[in-house]
Image: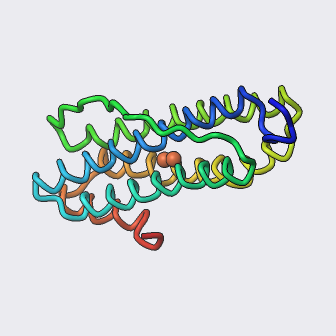
């Protein structure tokens, strides 16, 4: 790629476009969990996942904004998300931890592509932005939520404790 056209390499652009898809998939998955928990009568669980979904949409927008700043082409595609069988209220919380670990791995691939291309402006942006937020997404927001679900107490009480993990931010 000609640096006068965009400062980002083709590899970084492709990975960032894929990352937008991953973030939007997270958005859709968390909206699905919000709706499932609402149907089961867990209003706090619904609010928690609406907040998580909102964060994921912001992540996609952060990448789009960065790509625009660097005149890189953004492509948004239709996203297929897995179907989850919510046979137990722990399922969304287990799947959220899995999803966040996957998201961290994908962000790390973006970071590695930046290092490979010696694009330190990009790796600095990633480290100070999305990668930093990803630490919160995995821990406390996902792993602590799962440990609350697996712990003692009523299901309604657990959902209200989980909501407190994000409520300040939404
Ligand atoms: Fe995210
Ligand atoms: Fe996340």
Residue 158 place in picture, x, y as percent? 27, 58
- Count the labels in the image: 0
Q: At x 47% / y 57%, what residue is drawn?
A: 55
67 and 31: which one is in front?
67
Most extreme residue toward the bottom is: 168
Residue at 43% in and 39% down: 97
4 with respect to 30 (left or right): right
Report x, y in % for residue 157: 23, 63
Colour scheme of the rendered structure: rainbow
Quadrant position of the C terminus in the picture: bottom left
Q: Residue at x 32, y 32 (%)?
A: 81
Displayed quadrant of residue 38: bottom left
Relative vertical location of residue 9 with respect to residue 137 in this rendering, above or below:
above
Name the spot of residue 138 as percent of width and height, x first: 52, 45
Figure quadrant of the N terminus: top right
- Residue 98 at x, y percent in the picture: 43, 33
Q: Residue at x 68, y 54 (%)?
A: 129
| Residue nearest the observer in this picture, 168 or 50 | 50
Q: Is residue 108 above or below residue 38?
A: above
């Amino acid at each position: 790629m000609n640096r006068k056209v965009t400062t980002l390499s083709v590899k970084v652009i492709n990975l960032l476009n894929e990352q937008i898809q991953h973030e939007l998939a997270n958005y859709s998955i968390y909206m699905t969990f919000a709706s499932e928990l609402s149907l089961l009568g867990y209003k706090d669980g619904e609010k928690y996942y609406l907040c998580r979904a909102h964060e994921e949409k912001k992540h996609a927008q952060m990448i789009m904004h960065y790509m625009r700043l660097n005149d890189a082409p953004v492509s948004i595609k239709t996203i297929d998300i897995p179907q989850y069988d919510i046979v137990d209220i722990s399922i969304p919380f287990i799947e959220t931890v899995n999803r966040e670990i996957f998201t961290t791995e994908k962000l790390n691939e973006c970071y590695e592509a930046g290092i490979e291309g010696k694009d330190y402006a990009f790796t600095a942006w990633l480290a100070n932005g999305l990668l930093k937020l990803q630490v919160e997404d995995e821990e406390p927001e996902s792993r602590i939520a799962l440990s609350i679900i697996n712990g003692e107490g009523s299901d309604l009480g657990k959902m209200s404790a989980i909501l407190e993990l994000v409520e300040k931010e939404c």
